[in-house]
Amino acid sequence: MADIALYDLIIVGGGPAGLTAGIYAMRAALKTVLVEKGVAGGQVNNTEIVENWPGLESITGAELAANFLRHASSYGLLVKTREIVAVEPGLHYHTVRLDNGEELRAHAVILGMGGSPRKLGVAGEDENYGKGVSYCATCDGFFFRNKEVIVVGGGDSATEEALYLAKLATRVTIVHRRDALRASMILQQRVQAQPKINIIWNSVVTTIRSDQNGFTGVALRDVVTGQQRELSADGIFIFIGFLPNNQLVPAGTVMNANGFVASNAKCETNMPGIFVVGDLREKYARQIVTAAGDGCTAALAAAHYVENKKMGV
Ligand code: NAP
């Protein structure tokens, strides 16, 4: 059997956190490989415009993601596009197994798998995904030009995406389960100032309606009065938060009740040599800039860890 290369560091996930870790790891001269199963840049690719990356007042998500990858690659970071099937901690090295049977080994691993959209879990949702039900306005908004859409949720994502959709659609109806938005004040103000957006408060979607061509509307329930109503539209965009992609997190790693991975100020998990970054990490603010910050912290801490390990400290 051929010798299996031993890396200093394996980065799992190529979002802003993973790619920033890649930049810092390469600058620290760590022998590093980053594994990403999809498009590098992660969720940033699904964001129309990013306006809160310091130093750039406005940039498309796709462009920022491409910049991250180009920057990391400029240091010679090895990026493998493959699905990982297992991350196995070990005493001497950690093992990462890929879907093609390949095995990677490293002294340290940075977990940066991010999160995925939370689903409503109502009848009709799965069957009509791609037929009027969407979790990404940047990807699917174009299909709803001059049409009417519903947006579910009251956070930053829902309001930001409703504002984006209002540029395309004739009417955007936000359905929110409470009587106040969770979104940041600047987004709330923009929503209020956009005449194409109206909000149905205190309401939840109970069923997604469809016909043979796909989505036709929703059944709503007012959570205060209990009243039911029907609302027709051409499409529905669901932005009700996201769930951590923690399937590959090794057994024994401490996570909170919601499945986000616990870590200290150095992004170290309770497993020696295993670090966590970005949206998968238990933390207060899930932003591109905090993901990048985690990537920096984890890579610097990993460099220190690997150096000590090699010296037998
Ligand atoms: P979020 O902040 O968790 O908001 C989720 C929204 O969906 C909340 O309004 C919540 O209602 C609602 N919701 C949750 N479960 C629901 C259900 N089962 N049925 C109906 N409504 C439900 O999620 P997010 O908006 O995706 O944002 C995630 C993180 O990314 C946040 O930290 C956010 O600040 C950040 N983010 C930032 C930006 C930006 O800065 N530009 C853009 C996007 C996201 P309640 O309010 O009643 O809980």
Image (cartoon, grey):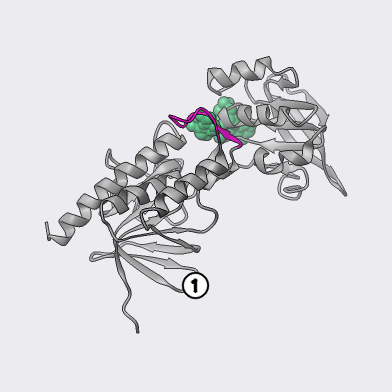
Name the residue rendered at 32%, 43% in the picture: 296
**Coordinates of residue 61 in the picture (x, y in percent):** 56, 40
Q: Is residue 132 visible?
A: yes
Magenta-colored span: 48-59
- The outermost residue toward the bottom is 1
Residue 97 versus residue 210 in the image, above or below: below
- The outermost residue toward the right is 212
Q: Locate the C terminus and report the quarter of the image it occupies.
A: bottom left
Magenta includes 226?
Answer: no
**Coordinates of residue 307 in the picture (x, y in percent):** 18, 56
Nearer the observer, 244 or 109? 109
Q: Is the CB of the residue bearing disc 1 within 8 angstroms of ligand 1? A: no
Element carrying mark 1: loop
Name the residue rendered at 56%, 23% in the picture: 183
Residue identifier under label 1? 100
Nearer the observer, 166 or 63? 63
Residue 159 versus residue 91 in the image, above or below: above
Q: Is 276 placed left or right of 204 in the picture?
A: left
Total residue callouts: 1
Q: Is 280 placed left or right of 31 in the picture?
A: right
Q: Quadrant of the rendered structure where residue 62 is?
A: top right
Pointer 1 local density, CA inside 10 Å: few below 14, some 14–19, many at least 20? few
Q: Is 103 placed left or right of 168 in the picture?
A: left
**Coordinates of residue 312 in the picture (x, y in percent):** 12, 60
**Coordinates of residue 136 in the picture (x, y in percent):** 65, 41
Nearer the observer, 41 or 11? 41
Q: Amino acid at mark 1?
A: Asn
Name the residue rendered at 55%, 18% in the picture: 186
Q: Main secondary structure of the magenta part?
A: loop
Of the four image quadrants, the one with ligand 1 is: top right
Q: Is residue 113 visible?
A: no
Residue 117 versus residue 36 in the image, above or below: above
